[in-house]
Image: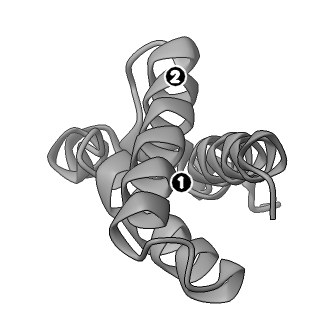
Amino acid sequence: MPLALEATVFAVIGLLAGLAALTLVPEYYPMARGLTMGTALVSALLSGLVTRFTLAGDGAAPTLVITVLCTGLLTSVLARPDLAARRGSHRRGRHAH
């Protein structure tokens, strides 16, 4: 797969990871949304390119799997579950009484 196409796939992985983090557990990411999205995007691009060159282009599937794992791990560095526990879950107030 050409590098330009792989870089585009890495960017999509990063954007999806950032969006998933902000959608699934927004209380863990109290900082600006741009920071979370930017971190996910940059981590996907860097981990994808490092993985691609480390594996010497031995296959797109292993590169993509490792990129997804690294992106998830690096994006989770920003998570602040300690702050979410103090403020309470965002889902708590949505139940009908």
Q: Residues within 10 Å of mark 1 (few under 14, many from 20)?
A: some
Quadrant in the rendering for residue 35: top left
Mark 1 or mark 2, whichever is nearer to me: 2
Quick check: 21 above or below 1? above
Frontmost residue, 68 versus 95: 68
Q: Residue at x 43, y 30 (%)?
A: 39
- The residues bearing labels 1 and 2 have C-alpha atoms spaced at a distance of 17 Å
What residue is disc 1 on?
25
Q: Secondary structure at mark 2?
A: helix
Residue 23 locus on image (x, y percent): 70, 48
Q: Residues within 10 Å of mark 2 (few under 14, many from 20)?
A: some
Residue 9 locus on image (x, y percent): 78, 52
Residue 84 locus on image (x, y percent): 31, 45
Q: Secondary structure at mark 1?
A: loop
What residue is disc 2 on?
38
Frontmost residue, 60 versus 10: 60
The colour scheme applied to this rendered structure is one colour
Q: Is residue 79 left or right of residue 32?
A: left
> Which amino acid is tagged 1?
Val
Q: Residue at x 75, y 62 (%)?
A: 95
Q: N-terminal of the two: label 1 or label 2?
A: 1
Quick check: 30 above or below 55? above
Name the outermost residue toward the left: 82
